[in-house]
Amino acid sequence: MDKKAENNQTDKEKVLNIIKNVVTWLVVAAAVAMMIFTIISATTLDRNNRSLFGKKMFIVNSDSMKATDFAAGDLIFVKEVDPSTLKEGDIISYTSTNTENFGELITHKIKKLTVTASGEPGFITYGTTTGEEDKTIVTYPYIVGKYTGKIAKMGYFFQFLKTTPGYIVCILVPFMLLIISQAWTSIKLFKQYKAEQNAALEEEKSKIAAEKEETQRMMAELLAMKAQIEQQGGAPITTPGTAPFQTQTPPPSPAPEAPKANQNAERIASLEKDLADVEKNIAELRAAKEELEATYKTAETESQISELSVTIGKLTAVKVQISAELQKLKN
């Protein structure tokens, strides 16, 4: 049951991570798109002398062509052409020379070709909504280009983008969300790193405590072994840094040769067993010391290594004395 609950929790975390990544990338895409739109709006939109991929872009401000082609708020595309190629029925954008709206950009349909009083070629244009002809003839120098297409109502979006609320909603907010998302992710990763570090430290402390307990157990066995050896052999055993254990052994009473030989054999067997135990303890302590030396060094581990070194030295001294007594008995 616990395993199933753990798997469910893992699946939920995976789903949440996927959702978070998708949302993050959507925010990034939106922010980048808004930045591109802003650049286009600032550098190309409603500019007679600027184009993007060969097309100029303008926002329609009136409904004079609503009946047939486009309405106010639409974004229209205009392409530069040779004015001599234009014909009746084409929709053109031009700069007005009428005193009522001088300098404004007008996009109307060509009604017919004509010439001015001075013989200059031009066009008579009109708005399809009212059908009224424009008051001035459009000559070649004032033609901006030919209408090629539109995006309905996109002009309203670009107009909104130029305002302060538009900048805040479309540019600032997405970038702030992105920054907050990345900051939150960084905080979570840092907390996870600290938790893993603390867990590893606690595990190391537990391991050191267990090794310390094992060392203390081995020391207790060593002291008990020393006492046993001294009681049996009578010779004091010394270890580095400690005073010898003084034992009083009564002078041996005369005994027959056979019983003495039996006593020596028993003594040798006991010492050989003790020697094997000491060598085993030394090997275990050395292995524990090497393992500690390979781990992350702390003040506590350094202390443990020092204690193990002292213990190994004491055990080695005991081993030497047991070996010497064995050699003496065998000779």
Image: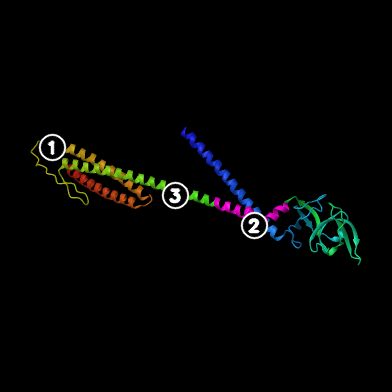
Q: Does 122 appear above or below 181?
A: below
Q: Where is residue 253 in the image (x, y as percent from the top left)?
A: 8, 39
Q: Is residue 206 magenta?
A: no
Under circle 2, the secondary element is helix
Q: Which amino acid does label 2 sit on?
A: Thr
Residue 6 or 99: which is nearer the viewer? 99
Circle on res. 64: none
Q: Is residue 212 left or right of residue 148?
A: left
Could you tell me if the residues under marks 3 and 2 are in contact, i.e. CB atoms within 8 Å? Answer: no
Mark before the other along the chain sequence, 1 or 2: 2
Mark nearest the camera among 1 and 2 is 2
Residue 34 or 221: which is nearer the viewer? 34
Determine which residue is flagged by label 2: 164
Mark nearest the camera among 3 and 2 is 2
How much space separates mark 3 and mark 1, taking CA atoms? 69 Å
Q: What residue type is labelled 3?
A: Lys
Q: Which amino acid does label 1 sit on?
A: Lys
Q: Position of residue 291 (x, y in %)?
A: 36, 47
Residue at image location 11% in from the left, 36% down from the top: 257
Q: Is residue 55 left or right of residue 271?
A: right
Identify the image quadrant of residue 330: top left
Determine which residue is flagged by label 3: 194
Determine which residue is flagged by label 1: 260
